[in-house]
Amino acid sequence: MARLTGFADAAHDDAVADPDPADAQDVQDARTVRERADGRARAARAGVSIRAVATDDMTALADMMGLPGVRRDTLGVSYRTPESMRQWFEKQQNGNGMVGLVATAGDTSVPVGLAALTFRPPRRTHCASLLLCVHDDWQGRGIGGALLGALMECADRSFGLRRIELTVYVDNAPALALYRRAGFGIEGRARGYALRDGVYADVYRMARLAPAAPFDAR
């Protein structure tokens, strides 16, 4: 497996002088445009539609959370019931708030992927935590990229979020590559963070930082 390099490594290798804020904004703007274009292209190639989570999705989402691949690579509770999924969504939405998107493929309305941002308490209203999972049978087809691209567009254009954070198992190479393409960087490694297959596994803490949205000068 190739060496995984986080933002901290890149910053250390390339740091010479503090970047000009205008240049940094230009780089961020260009990256954001590429992310959106990449997400839409992936969605088109996969024949994917993105929409908001609906109450009718809970049975399909509960089934997806119980699949072997999803259970192994996500840190959420496995084997959820439709009712527990509904209660979880309602709790998140009635707390600090949450936005959830699902991906559907082809002519079916059944979700094959889920992405959600959970907002944080008052001093961290500029932050959100990311959840992303894809049905075992649909992994590797651009579903995750399409969902992530759509959710990041919401984060940037509708919510003005400055920081989005997540945890991911250190050996989940496909997820790490996807998150890096979307602008996430590794901030640290938590050892023995979660029990997986009877072993306490390490995770990376990752985050995507964005500049404040500009004011319309017109």
Image (spheres, rainbow, N blue to C red):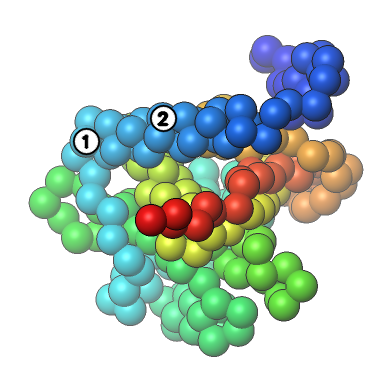
Front position in the image: 174 or 39: 39
Where is residue 79 drawn, in percent x and y?
53, 65
Whether residue 59 is visible, yes or no, is no
Left or right: residue 170 versus residue 182 is: right
- Image quadrant assignment for residue 37: top left
Left or right: residue 90 versus residue 54 is: right
Residue shown at the point (67%, 35%) measured from the top left: 21
Front position in the image: 217 or 174: 217
Quadrant location of the N terminus in the rendered image: top right
**Circles 1 and 2 in contact, beta carbons < 8 Å:** no
Please tell me which of labels 1 and 2 falls first in the chain: 2
Mark 2 residue type: Arg
Crowding near the residue tagged with mark 1, few <14, some 14–19, many ≥20 C-alpha atoms within 10 Å: few
Mark 1 residue type: Ala
Q: Please determine whether, in this image, residue 11 is positioned above or below residue 121.
A: above
Q: Kindly give the residue lying farthest to the bottom in the view shown.
A: 94
Where is residue 42 drawn, in percent x and y?
31, 33
Q: Which residue is mark 2?
A: 34
- Image quadrant assignment for residue 154: bottom left
Q: Please determine whether, in this image, residue 64 is positioned above or below residue 68.
A: below
Where is residue 181 drawn, in percent x and y?
53, 29
Number of the front mark, 1 or 2:
2
Disc number at residue 44? Answer: 1
Per the image, label 2 sits on a secondary structure element best described as: helix
